Amino acid sequence: MFIGIDIGGANTKVATSDGGFVDSIYAPLWKNNTILHDVVLSELKKQFEPRIEAVGVVMTGELCDCFATKREGVLHIKKALSTVFKNIKFFDINCVFRDGLDVDKDPLSFAATNWLASAKLVSEQYKNAIFVDVGSTTTDVIPIVGGEIKAKRTDFERLKYGELIYSGILRTNVATLLKKVKVGEGKEKEECKISSELFAITADVYLALGYLNEGDYSCETPDSYAFAGREKEEKSRVSAVRRLARVVCSDLEGIGEDSAVGIAEQVKNVQVQELSDSIEKIKERYGLRKLVAAGTGDFIAKEAAESLNIAFLSLSSVYGKRISATFPAYAVAKLLESGI
């Protein structure tokens, strides 16, 4: 059995190469960096031993602010994995699997590699395409030309070139996406600035709009502390709409549900437009006319593709929604199995 593990700052995703097991575990490293070893990896080892042939690893969790540097983060993650699993291979920025000793020698070659594993697997099937992965926290926009991945190899560079958008459909603070919203009904709508507080996140947006259900809300809510003993209410649609109303320093008595949902629609429009802008630049730069999408937010990619009138394929239609939502973990498992 080949297992792929994608270690992020908030979620650790796991998949087997046959797709028989797929999971995303909320494990916020920035709160407790021992959670990876003590909880997540130890449980996985119990579940899969002795059937494990090899474990492939990609990561982004090294950027957590519990680490002083990315180097420290990579080495922490490597150590946690190496003390749990025996035959473990780390995927580097050159799309090569290496062992723990190589990580020790050059840690930064293994930082932020989850998108790269996904793009590598996609490039074997779709030689000329823009690969888009809309996840809980970030969105990758990766040009693939003639089967070659053309994106920059660090997140810093990808941010500069529009190949990484630091917003997703769960954990992004609404205040980072909008500065003003229109509130009200019909001709009565007025423009209003929003607060810079962490009142609502994009999980609230897509729960309010019906794209996500309560079970999809896999991160903490901004006001989780207020729901002790009422956890079922925390991630209900009405709670999400209330949080959206707070973005303009109001509540549902003040602006009404329709206006709060209207705020959600405006957030969605901004995310679609931002992704469309990145896709259009890459499309023109490389002459690409096909978009291949993965991630829980592939509906955002679909709308962006439609706005640009380019062909769209969701990997959820190929692999199923669960694999598409954890695609880097599945991809690194498949690549390891194939001997890449």
Image (cartoon, rainbow, N blue to C red):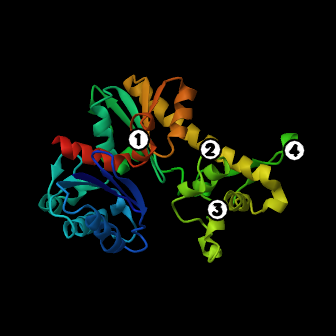
Amino acid type assigned to the residue bearing label 4 in the image: Glu
Cα distance, mark 1 to mark 4? Answer: 39 Å
Q: Which mark is residue 337?
A: none
Q: Secondary structure at mark 4?
A: helix
Labels 2 and 1: the sequence-earlier one: 1
Cα distance, mark 2 to mark 3? Answer: 18 Å
Labels 4 and 2: the sequence-earlier one: 4
Image quarter for residue 84? bottom left
Cα distance, mark 2 to mark 1? Answer: 19 Å
Residue visible at 51% across and 37% down in the picture = 301
Residue 99 seen = yes
Tell me the mark number nearer the camera, choosing from 2 and 3.
2
> In this image, 166 relative to 226: left or right?
left
Q: Position of residue 309 (x, y in %)?
A: 53, 23
Give the labeled residue for mark 3.
196
Q: Position of residue 90 (x, y in %)?
A: 21, 55
Label 2 Cα crowd, 10 Å radius (few <14 / some 14-19 / many 20+): some
Cα distance, mark 4 to mark 2? Answer: 22 Å
Give the labeled residue for mark 1.
163
Tell me the mark number nearer the camera, choosing from 4 and 2.
2
Q: Secondary structure at mark 1?
A: loop
Q: Which mark is residue 188?
A: 4
Label 3 Cα crowd, 10 Å radius (few <14 / some 14-19 / many 20+): some
Asked if disc 2 and disc 1 are in contact, CB closer than 8 Å, the reply is no
Q: Which mark is residue 268?
A: 2
Tell me the mark number nearer the camera, choosing from 3 and 4.
4
Label 1 Cα crowd, 10 Å radius (few <14 / some 14-19 / many 20+): many
Cα distance, mark 3 to mark 4? Answer: 25 Å
Labels 1 and 3: the sequence-earlier one: 1
Amino acid type assigned to the residue bearing label 3 in the image: Ser
Q: Secondary structure at mark 2?
A: helix
